[in-house]
Every structure is written in structure tokens, then in C-alpha cells.
Image: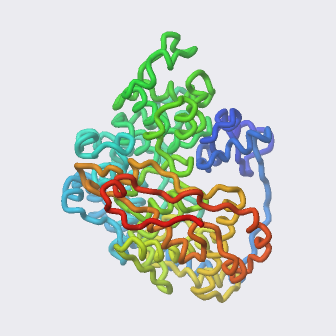
């Protein structure tokens, strides 16, 4: 934040800045790149990449306008779409009632009511939830903490028992509204799901801050049993300023709390300049969250072992591997795969693992992808093999969708003139088959990079896949065979069982320049085994690497 202010004072205000904070400067592997006064490209340690090159900030200034094939048609299509969104926003009765829906979370949990889906009604409710209600993604804070979506107590807890409604309602989206100074959104977006808060409790001269998103609220809420809303606002602003990923940081704090609970870490481990006698963090208390984060950012004391994420923390401490939550070294987002199994498959198979934004079949179908684009139908199945096969189609579409610059939430807000807009913007008459081929090419190229670098792995904590399964709650008795789904996905993508793309797949997708790299590629060293299912002999699917 301060960097952006200084750069603008020197070079003027009509420019864009991408910078890193102390976390990136100290090469934290969970640091990000900051833009727009506190929005972060947070995942994968991108801040450490800039930090390793002694690159503090990039400043861009320009006045050239983009050229379009048919600007008039683009404007026309946008206006029609925006009118639909605004029509959804005008229902004053529903607008007033939507913020109260989270009080129905116990019923939603008990009767397993699915809030997503396609159709105009689902789109209307999504727009109102995100936009008209002024709640943004925090609309889901309470509901997800109770229905099994939000991980609770480091993936070992149950919402209604460990983070019950009395606690969950303290961090509900509606409670942020008293701090809202103004709403905001991306350029041209009619939904405008963001908000700037004024919070006098911030220890900075500037009291404005971005409203925390759902992921941050969950990572520093039910994941660590913290119901202090104001602490979440302070944590969010601090991590925005220092440039650290809130998802990964929340996972690390959960790891610390459990390590203390199990006696692996004690008070003396937290001795530091600010606390010469140390301190002892515990579940449900917000008192020492910021001190832990500051140790991580500055790599002070125990913070040096925690600064690179949960996997590295367990390795450096020498204990706690079984509860250091990650997929292939990347901390998991705030969506429990035991509720949406195919999401768990993307956590281990996507070239950038541990993402809820990788284009999951379960996730995107619940968001309404079949209604968003009418020209393509996305099937689903309860069969593990078939679910993996069907997921490949969503992945192919989603990679092209992302490459075109679409917002991930767009599939939630109803029908969009997808192919018409592509033609208006670029002059391309493109078919659904070609879009899927483009996405297939993108994902295969990404997979080849990981294969060449020896980065294909199926590593995820046994706890996260229900090994053993929870005995209570909405996801009780769920135990996942992600490997079986992964093999169905690899088969449909034209990859070998070890995840390396096949020679004929590269040739079909015009990726011939990758063929020489096949000799350098190493695939999956070993399949993921659900130890509970194997022990109970409930897992008939086994395969061997050749």
C-alpha cells in the first residue's frame, strides 16, 4: 500500500502498479504480488519470485486503446447482459431478505439443500447475494461453515459442534455492512461484489481497507475457530500490506494451533522481540494470531520455520506432517473436498495444485456453468471413474474461459453471449469444439511443464480425503478415492497413468515442440492411496506404474 502511494507521488496517478511487501522481500513461499491498494495475486509464492530478483515493483503507464473487431456489437451485447443483471438487482423484497438467509444454515445443513445450480432463478439469487445485498462473497460465511464446505478446526472439526451458529453468526457477511464506505467492482462489471470499509481499529493513518473475502474469513474463522470479526478485518489488512496469501497463512496458523495442542510447540518456541517470555496460542483465541503472522513475515524465531507454508513447517520442525494441510505443497483453499469430491481431484491433478479456481466439475456445475453457456453441455456422474472423465471437459472449457479474461464468478450470474462476444471482440467465428481444443492445449502445455520439472505428484493429507472419515456432521462417513477419479481424468485428457501427456496427444494439439521434452519427463512417482479404504478393503482400484 505504501509502495503504491510512493510510486504514484513520483510518477503520477494515471498508472498501474504491481509490487511486493516484506513477505516477498523475505522470500516467503506464501507471499504474493499486490495491486490496487491491497488486492493480491496471492497463491504459489509469486511474491518470492519478484523478491529473488530484487524487484520491488513494476509500474506501467500508457494511453493506447485496445482495438476490437466490432466494438458496436460488443457494446450492444454488454448492454443486453447488463440489463438482465440490473433487472435481477431490482427486487427490493428479495434484496432485504437475502442477508437473512444465513440464519437458515442449520436447515440447509440438515436437509442438504443445494444452493447452486443453473437457470434464471439461481442466477437471480446469485446476483442479489453478491451484489444487491452488498455482501459479496461474505454472503456464504455462515452457510458454508455449517454445510460442510468450510474446513473446521484444521479439517478435523464439525461446523455445528466446533463452530456452531452462535459463533458463525459473529462473522456473517451482514456484520461487515456497518463498516462499508463504498462498494466497488472490476471495470464495467454490473455486479460490483467488492467493498471498501472504514475501520478505525486499524493501526495505520489510513483507516480504509478492503472487505475480507470469504476465503479469508474462513481461513481465519472456522478453520481456527476464531469468531472475532474485527480481528479478521485487521488480519486481512495486515496481510494485504505485507503481501502474504491469506489462505496459506490461515492454514499455517491452524497448523500452529494444533501443534501447540499436541505439545509439539510450547511457549518458549514463541519467544521473540515483542514477547521476550514467549506466548501460547490456542484454538478460538484471536489474541496471538497477528503476532504469529508478524513472526512469519519477518522470519523471526519460529516464524522462519513457518514462513514457507505448512509442508515446509512440518519438515523444519520435524513433526506434524499428518496435520500440515496441503496438496503437493500448496495449502488448500476453504472448500472441503469431502463435500465436493471432484474439487479434491483438481487439488492434486491441476498443474497449480490446491486451487478452488482450477475448473472443478462439481464446483462449476453447482455455480451454473450449464446455464452460462448454452452451446456446451457438461455432464456429471456419481461414479468415480466417470466423474473423472467428465471433469476433463470442464477443465478444457475453463482454461479457455480463463485465457479470455473472464471472471470466475461469471458462470454464476446467468446466460452469457459467450461465442457472440468472442466474435465481436476478435472477429473469430469459433465453435464449441474449437474452444474445448484451445483449453485442452493450454492445460496440456501446463501439464508438460510440470512433467518436465518432475512436479507431478498426488500428495494430499489423509485427513482431508476422509481417512478416517468424520463421525459427525454433513460430511460424515465420506472417504474419497481421488486416485480413481484422477485416472479417469488423465484418460480423457490423453495423459498416461502417471500424468505425462501422451505423444499422440501432443501431436494432435499441435504441441510438437514439446516432443523432445518427453525424454526428460517424469510422472507420478506413486499413486495416492486412501489408507482407510485400503485398510477396510473398500478400495478395489489399484494400479502399478510401469
Picture coordinates of residue 376, whole percent (x, y): 49, 84
Picture coordinates of residue 154, whole percent (x, y): 39, 41
Q: Is residue 502 left or right of residue 247?
A: right
Say if 253 sits above or below 332 in the image. Answer: above
Taking depth in this image into account, of 444 and 419 the one nearest to the observer is: 444
Query: Image quarter for residue 385?
Result: bottom left
Taking depth in this image into account, of 531 and 423 the one nearest to the observer is: 531
Asked whether residue 520 is in view, the answer is: yes
Q: Is residue 521 left or right of residue 318?
A: right
Query: Image quarter for residue 91?
Result: bottom left
The quarter of the image holding the N terminus is top right
Residue at image coords 53%, 56%: 458
Residue at image coords 52%, 74%: 392
Taking depth in this image into account, of 372 and 100 the one nearest to the observer is: 372
Picture coordinates of residue 15, whole percent (x, y): 74, 51
Picture coordinates of residue 166, whole percent (x, y): 23, 40
The quarter of the image holding the C terminus is bottom right
Q: Give the residue furthest to the top.
A: 277
Amino acid at each position: 500500500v505504501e509502495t503504491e502511494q510512493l510510486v504514484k507521488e513520483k510518477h503520477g496517478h494515471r498508472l498501474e502498479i504491481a509490487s511486493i511487501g516484506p513477505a516477498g522481500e523475505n522470500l516467503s513461499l506464501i507471499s504474493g504480488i499486490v495491486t490496487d491498494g491491497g488486492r493480491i495475486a496471492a497463491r504459489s509464492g509469486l511474491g518470492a519470485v519478484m523478491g529473488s530478483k530484487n524487484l520491488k515493483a513494476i509500474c506501467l503507464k500508457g494511453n493506447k486503446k485496445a482495438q476490437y473487431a466490432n466494438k458496436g456489437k460488443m457494446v450492444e451485447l454488454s448492454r443486453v447482459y447488463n440489463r438482465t443483471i440490473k433487472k435481477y438487482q431490482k427486487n427490493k423484497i428479495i434484496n432485504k431478505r437475502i442477508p437473512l438467509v444465513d440464519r437458515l444454515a442449520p436447515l440447509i445443513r440438515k436437509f442438504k439443500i443445494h444452493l447452486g445450480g443453473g437457470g434464471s432463478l439461481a442466477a437471480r439469487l446469485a446476483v442479489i447475494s453478491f451484489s444487491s445485498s452488498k455482501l459479496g462473497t461474505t454472503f456464504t460465511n455462515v452457510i458454508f461453515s455449517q454445510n460442510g464446505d468450510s474446513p473446521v478446526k484444521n479439517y478435523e472439526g464439525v461446523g455445528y459442534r466446533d463452530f456452531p451458529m452462535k459463533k458463525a453468526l459473529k462473522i456473517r457477511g451482514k456484520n461487515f455492512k456497518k463498516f462499508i464506505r463504498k462498494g466497488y467492482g472490476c471495470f464495467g462489471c454490473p455486479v460490483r461484489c467488492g467493498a471498501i470499509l472504514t475501520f478505525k481499529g486499524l493501526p495505520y493513518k489510513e483507516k480504509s481497507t478492503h472487505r475480507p473475502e470469504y476465503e479469508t474469513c474462513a481461513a481465519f474463522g472456522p478453520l481456527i475457530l476464531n469468531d472475532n470479526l474485527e480481528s479478521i478485518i485487521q488480519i486481512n489488512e495486515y496481510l494485504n500490506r505485507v503481501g502474504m496469501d491469506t489462505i496459506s497463512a490461515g492454514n499455517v496458523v491452524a497448523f500452529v494451533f494444533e501443534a501447540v495442542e499436541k505439545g509439539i510447540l510450547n511457549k518458549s518456541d514463541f519467544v521473540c522481540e515483542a514477547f521476550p517470555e514467549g506466548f501460547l496460542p490456542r484454538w478460538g483465541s484471536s489474541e496471538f494470531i497477528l503476532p504469529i503472522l508478524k513472526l512469519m513475515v519477518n522470519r523471526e524465531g519460529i516464524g522462519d520455520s513457518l514462513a514457507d507454508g505448512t509442508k515446509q513447517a512440518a519438515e523444519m520442525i520435524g513433526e506434524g506432517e499428518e496435520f500440515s494441510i496441503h496438496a503437493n505443497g500448496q495449502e488448500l483453499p476453504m472448500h472441503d473436498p469431502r463435500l465436493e469430491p471432484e474439487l479434491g481431484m483438481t487439488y492434486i491433478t491441476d498443474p497449480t495444485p490446491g486451487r478452488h479456481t482450477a475448473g472443478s466439475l462439481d464446483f462449476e456445475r453447482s455455480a451454473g456453468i450449464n446455464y452460462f453457456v448454452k452451446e456446451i453441455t457438461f455432464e456429471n456422474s456419481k461414479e468415480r471413474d466417470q466423474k473423472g472423465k467428465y471433469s476433463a471437459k470442464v477443465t478444457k472449457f475453463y482454461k479457455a474461459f480463463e485465457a479470455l479474461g473472464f471472471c470466475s464468478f461469471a458462470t454464476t450470474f446467468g446466460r452469457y453471449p459467450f461465442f457472440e462476444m468472442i466474435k465481436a471482440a476478435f472477429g473469430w467465428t469459433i465453435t464449441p469444439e474449437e474452444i474445448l481444443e484451445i483449453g485442452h492445449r493450454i492445460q496440456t502445455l501446463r501439464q508438460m511443464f510440470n512433467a518436465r520439472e518432475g512436479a507431478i505428484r498426488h500428495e494430499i493429507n489423509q485427513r482431508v480425503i476422509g481417512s478416517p472419515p468424520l463421525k459427525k456432521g454433513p460430511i460424515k462417513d465420506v472417504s474419497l478415492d481421488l486416485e480413481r477419479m484422477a485416472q479417469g481424468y488423465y484418460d480423457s485428457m490423453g495423459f498416461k497413468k502417471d500424468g505425462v501427456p501422451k505423444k499422440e496427444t501432443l501431436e494432435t494439439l499441435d504441441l510438437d515442440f514439446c516432443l523432445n521434452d518427453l525424454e526428460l519427463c517424469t510422472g507420478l512417482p506413486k499413486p495416492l492411496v486412501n489408507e482407510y479404504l485400503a485398510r477396510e478393503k473398500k478400495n478395489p482400484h489399484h494400479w502399478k506404474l510401469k
